[in-house]
Amino acid sequence: MRYALISDIHANLPALDAVLADIAARPGIDAAYHLGDLVGYAPWPDQTVARLRAAGMPGVAGNYDSTVATHASHCGCRYEDPRQEELSHLSFAWTLEHTSAATKAFLATLPFRVDLRPLGGHAAGPTVTLIHGNQVLNTVYVHEDRTDDFLAKMGGGIGARAGDVVCFGHTHKPWHRVVAGIHYVNTGSVGRPKDGDSRAGYVLLDVTADTGVRVDIVRVAYDVEAAARGIMASTLPDAFAEYLRGGGPPTPDA
Ligand SMILES: [Fe+2]
């Protein structure tokens, strides 16, 4: 089975459209799933959700999805920089106000976790698990510098065994590591990368009986300026346009 896994779209419709086109143009993809955070930071929350629903793409609830759906007090995002923290509150308030009741109702239905059996459930494994953050909360950041011990505990909490694949997003930086035979895959971000590369990101995951697990991190150029123009034409902070252009936060002296 070959999966396309897309995460952290964050209401960036031009980026989502570019990724959906890239997926459609690749032969041999059996299924596509999203790993949450469909809304926030950009001006197309309803359109983004409508696009995914029209594509029939299932997926899990990110922290932004569940906090917008439940009108929580905060998106559950964490920023080291006080300015980015302040901006995150503005984004959350804007998104609460500009996301329709129907979209919120849909976001509330997203499951927390999805388990896939690429070789069929009649075989013992492997299992591919999709979550947004970690196995307990969709707000926990699983960064690349997490220790092997942290990842092993996460895999244990999920019930993963050697050969299984644990996929998640939330940090907006893609990476892949194997600990005790379990693959940990951060699928990056379609609509708000934070690794300095402004292109949209997603992951192709192959799981076959013959060749085992293969992970490809994909980047797709898209019309960043169209997204930036949409942000600047809205009442969202213009800083979010600059963030997209730079593929992440401005450097402290920028
Ligand atoms: Fe996110």
Image: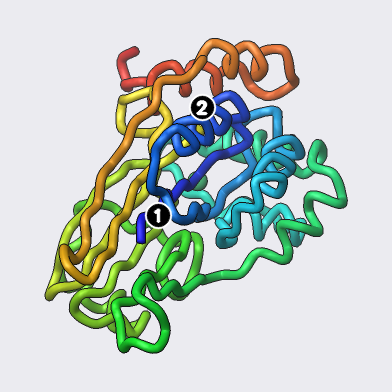
Q: Amino acid at mark 2?
A: Ala
Position of the C terminus, as image quadrant, is: top left
Residue at the spot 52% in from the left edge and 38% down from the top edge = 85
Q: Quadrant of residue 100?
A: top right
Secondary element under disc 1, as helix, strand or loop, is strand
Amino acid type indicated by mark 1 = Tyr
Can residue 157 be seen here? The reply is yes
Of the residues under marks 2 and 1, which one precedes in the sequence? 1
Image coordinates of residue 23 in percent, x first then y, are 45, 38
Asked if residue 179 lies left or right of residue 65, the reply is: left
Q: Give the residue pinned by disc 2.
A: 18
Which of label 2 and label 1 is nearer to you?
Answer: 1
Residue at point 30% right, 44% down? 174
In the image, is residue 163 above or below residue 71?
Answer: below
Give residue 47's quadrant in the image.
top right
Residue 3 badge: 1
Residue at 38%, 47% in the rendered image: 28
**Residue 253, how many percent across, how many down?**
30, 15
> Do the CB atoms of the residues marked 2 and 1 lie less than 8 Å apart?
no
